[in-house]
C-alpha cells in the first residue's frame, strides 16, 4: 500500500510490483472465501443431492435431444481457459420449454422454467413407495409404478400411462402377475438395451447409506428391476459413488475411487471380460487428454466413440459427466453448462451431475433462485416437497441403524 501511494513519477518499478501483488490478492479472494466457509453438513449435502438433481433435470429438460446451443468455448477449436470456465459457470441457467408436453418429458405444454421431467418423476415414485411402507423394497417400488400407471383421470390425462407402459410390464412380473395381466420379464424391457433407467429413481438411496458405498450398491441391486445386463452394475455403482460423495471430505477423486472399488459381485474378476465401468471411466480420462483442453474436440470424441445408439445407455451419463467435469477443472456450474452444450439426453446427464455436485459441495453450491424455482414447480405440478423427502430419508435411515425393540 505504501508503494501504491508513490506519485506517478516516483518509483515506477515499486508501483508496478505493488499492482501485481494487488492483482494476485484479488485473484485469490474466491479461494479465501471458500476456505472461510464452513464445510457443508451431511444434511446440506443430502439436500444438495436432491435439489441438484432437480436443477439438472429442469435445466436439461428444455434442451433434451434439441440442437445444442453452443458458446464460443464449445463451438470452435478453442482452449478452455480459466476465464472460459468462469464464463461457462456464469452462463448456466434454467430455461422454459418451447415444445408441447410429452410422456417422458414435461407434462405441461410450453412449461415454465423449473419444470421437471421423468428423471425427477421417478424420484417422486421412489419417495411414494418409501412413505407407504417406511422402507425401500422391490415390491414397494413396483406397486408405486403401477399406481401411477393406473392414473388416467388426473390432470395429466394419459401421460402417466404412456410414460410407464414399458416399466409397468416389468413391475407386474416382479409382483407375480401373469402375462394375461400384462406382465413381462424385466430382461426384455427396451429390447434388452442396458439403459440408465436406474439412475433416475435411485440416487436418494445414497442418502440412506452415506459414506457406505457397498451398502448403497447392494440396496440398489435388490430393488432395481428397471435395468438389465451391465446396466445393473453400472447404475448400482453410480449410487455407490453418490454415497461416497456424502462422506465428510469427499472429492471427485474419492467418488471415482468408490465407483471403481465397489464391486461386491466381482464384475472386475470375470475372466477375459473387463468391467465396463472401468472401461468407460478410463475412456472419460483418455478423451479429455486427447482433447488437449478443447471442449469441441472432447465433444467430437464423445460423439464418435461413446458407442451410443439411444444416448440413454447406462454408461453414457457417467462418461459425459466425468469427462466434462475434468475438462472444466471440476468447477460445479461450468461442468453443468458444458454438459448442456454437449447435448443429447441432457436432462438425464445433468440430473446425475447435479446430484454428484450437490452431494459433494452442499445445496448452497447452486444459486438460490434456481433452488427456489425447481422446488416451487415440484410442489405446484406434483404436490411433492424436498423437505418431506429429507424427512422420509431421515426416518428410514434411523430405522435402519436402530436396533429393533
Image: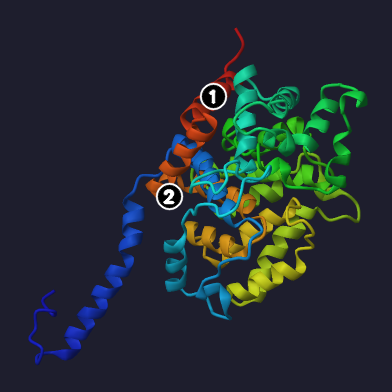
Within-10-Å neighbours for mark 2: few <14, some 14–19, many 20+: some
Q: Can residue 88 be seen in this view?
A: yes
Secondary element at tag 2:
helix
Judging by the rendered image, the residue that carries numbered circle 2 is 365
In what quadrant of the picture does the N terminus appear?
A: bottom left
Please tell me which residue lies in front, 71 or 400: 71
Relative to 294, residue 50 above or below: above
Q: Nearer the viewer, residue 25 or 207?
A: 207
Who's the residue at 48% across and 37% down the image? Answer: 47
| Total numbered labels | 2
* Left or right: 176, with 198 as reference point: right
Circle 1 sits on which residue?
392
Check disc 1: other Cα within 10 Å, few if <14, some if 14-19, many if 20+: some
Mark 2 → mark 1, Cα distance in angstroms = 23 Å
Residue ID at (77%, 37%): 226
Disc 1 element: helix
The structure residue drawn at horizontal position 53% and vertical position 39%, both measured from the top left corner, is 50
Of residues 99 and 318, the one nearer the viewer is: 99
First of labels 2, 1 by sequence position: 2
Position in image of residue 134 (x %, y %): 61, 18
Amino acid at each position: 500500500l505504501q508503494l501504491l501511494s508513490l506519485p506517478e513519477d516516483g518509483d515506477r518499478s515499486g508501483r508496478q510490483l505493488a499492482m501485481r501483488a494487488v492483482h494476485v490478492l484479488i485473484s485469490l479472494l474466491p479461494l479465501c472465501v471458500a476456505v472461510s466457509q464452513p464445510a457443508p453438513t451431511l444434511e446440506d449435502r443430502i439436500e444438495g443431492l436432491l435439489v441438484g438433481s432437480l436443477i439438472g433435470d429442469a435445466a436439461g429438460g428444455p434442451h433434451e435431444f434439441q440442437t445444442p446451443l453452443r458458446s464460443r468455448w464449445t463451438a470452435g477449436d478453442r482452449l478452455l481457459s480459466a476465464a472460459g470456465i468462469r464464463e461457462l459457470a456464469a452462463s448456466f441457467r434454467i430455461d422454459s420449454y418451447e415444445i408441447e408436453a410429452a410422456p417422458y418429458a414435461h407434462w405441461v405444454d410450453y412449461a415454465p422454467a423449473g419444470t421437471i421431467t421423468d428423471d425427477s418423476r421417478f424420484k417422486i415414485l421412489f419417495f411414494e413407495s418409501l412413505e407407504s411402507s417406511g422402507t425401500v423394497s422391490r415390491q414397494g417400488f413396483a406397486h408405486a409404478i403401477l399406481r401411477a400407471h393406473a392414473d388416467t383421470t388426473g390432470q395429466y390425462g394419459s401421460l402417466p400411462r404412456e410414460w410407464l407402459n414399458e416399466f409397468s410390464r416389468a413391475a407386474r412380473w416382479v409382483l407375480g402377475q401373469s402375462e394375461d395381466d400384462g406382465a413381462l420379464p424385466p430382461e426384455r424391457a427396451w429390447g434388452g438395451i442396458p439403459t440408465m433407467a436406474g439412475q433416475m429413481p435411485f440416487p436418494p438411496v445414497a442418502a440412506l447409506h452415506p459414506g457406505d458405498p457397498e451398502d448403497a450398491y447392494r440396496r440398489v441391486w435388490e430393488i432395481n428391476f428397471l435395468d438389465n445386463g451391465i446396466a445393473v452394475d453400472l447404475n448400482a455403482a453410480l449410487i455407490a459413488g453418490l454415497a461416497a460423495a456424502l462422506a465428510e471430505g469427499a472429492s471427485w477423486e474419492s467418488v471415482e475411487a468408490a465407483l471403481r472399488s465397489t464391486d461386491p459381485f466381482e464384475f472386475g474378476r470375470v475372466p477375459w471380460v473387463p468391467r465396463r465401468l472401468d472401461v468407460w471411466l478410463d475412456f472419460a480420462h483418455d478423451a479429455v487428454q486427447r482433447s488437449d483442453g478443447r471442449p469441441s474436440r472432447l465433444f467430437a470424441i464423445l460423439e464418435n466413440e461413446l458407442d451410443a445408439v439411444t444416448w440413454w445407455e447406462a454408461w453414457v451419463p457417467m462418461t459425459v459427466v466425468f469427462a466434462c467435469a475434468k475438462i472444466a477443472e471440476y468447477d460445479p456450474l461450468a461442468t453443468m453448462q458444458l454438459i448442456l452444450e454437449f447435448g443429447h439426453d441432457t436432462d438425464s446427464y445433468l440430473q446425475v451431475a447435479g446430484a454428484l455436485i450437490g452431494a459433494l459441495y452442499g445445496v448452497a453450491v447452486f444459486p438460490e433462485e434456481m433452488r427456489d424455482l425447481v422446488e416451487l414447480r415440484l410442489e405446484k405440478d406434483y404436490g411433492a416437497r424436498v423437505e418431506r423427502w429429507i424427512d422420509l430419508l431421515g426416518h428410514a435411515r434411523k430405522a435402519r441403524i436402530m436396533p429393533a425393540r
